[in-house]
Image (cartoon, rainbow, N blue to C red):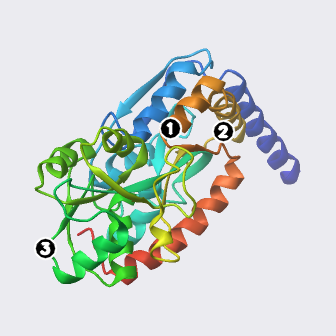
Amino acid sequence: MKHRHWLSACALTLASLAAAAQGYPSKPLRMVVTFPPGGAPDILARLFADRAQLGQPIVVDNKPGAGGNIGAEMVAKSAPDGYTLVMGTVGTHSINGALYSKMPYDMVRDFTPVAHVASAPNLLVVNNDLPVKNVAELITYMKANPNKLSFGSPGIGTSVHVSGELFKSMTGTSMTHVPYKGRQFAIPDLVGGQIQVMFDNMPSALPMAKDGKIRALAQTTAKRSGAAPDVPTVGETVPGFEATTWFAVFAPAGTPREVVARINEEMQRVYKLPDVADKLKSLGLEPWISTPEELARYQATEITKWAKVVKDSGARAD
């Protein structure tokens, strides 16, 4: 008899979850972006918010700080009902766990993967006055002037930060890391020469390099991006160097599977729209709209990779 009660209780729970999913969404959704407006995660979130047809508006909510941890923690602690999502990054969901001795959330256990959206190279850019034209010249200059250069990032644990740490450890060079509260604070200092180097996200750095405000030396992915085919990769000079920045949507742990499937389905539709796909490519973003399972597997490999980079570099966030 007990067994039957347990089964009927399970059936009721499943039925109520299914009913919740069927009526979903019945109120506006919130997409938390863990960095200030203007960067790639913000652009991706707003593209989705503008074009999604879920029958309810999606409000984009910028909650920057602590390398993205502040916004990600807020979502980790939200109700698992599909109304609060985060545009996670390689930092918030694969790097920060190795960098911060006290994390306010568990990068895997506290979230339900929804979909990987896009990845991008970082672009190794330098101040125009720095007397180097390529990666080899930069390495030579850094070896002749140890710790003379500073590299900026939009925060500790961002791909922009750890790309620099990976570069230092793979080339045996040294330079000083200067974390900012967001890339929009770092860029004026790069242009002005207060910092000389940055591994900025390509979507924000490429237009500035094309305008001649900063000099692009190399991109950090294994292969050259179609958005900048004339810019070599760091790996062409430093074999094996590869750092991809990526963006993916996560929901709080325990979000019903039907709700996750509904959001994933809409993300597949929106990000494959021809005008959206063109916009992503023009920004140097490579679209890959994954299943929740593919995102979970990819995240696991990235956590392993970046834990090693962080350990080898000795970088700490606190």
Residue behind mark 3: 148
Instruction: Say left or right for 182 vs 5.
Output: left
Identify which residue is drawn at 51% across, 77% down.
239
Up-down relation of residue 218 to residue 9 (above or below): below
The residue most toward the top is 55
Q: Element type at marker 3?
A: loop
Q: CA distance from mark 1 to mark 2?
A: 10 Å
Residue behind mark 2: 260
Q: Residue flagged by tag 2: what amino acid is it?
A: Val
Rendered location of residue 188, percent (x, y): 16, 44
Q: Residue flagged by tag 3: what amino acid is it?
A: Lys
User: For this rendering, which residue is in front, 277 or 88?
Assistant: 277
Up-down relation of residue 54 to residue 155 (above or below): above
Identify which residue is drawn at 57% across, 34% down.
82
Q: Can residue 164 be seen? A: yes
Q: Residues within 10 Å of mark 1 (few under 14, many from 20)?
A: many
Q: CA distance from mark 3 to mark 1?
A: 42 Å
Identify which residue is drawn at 47% across, 47% down.
88
Residue behind mark 1: 85
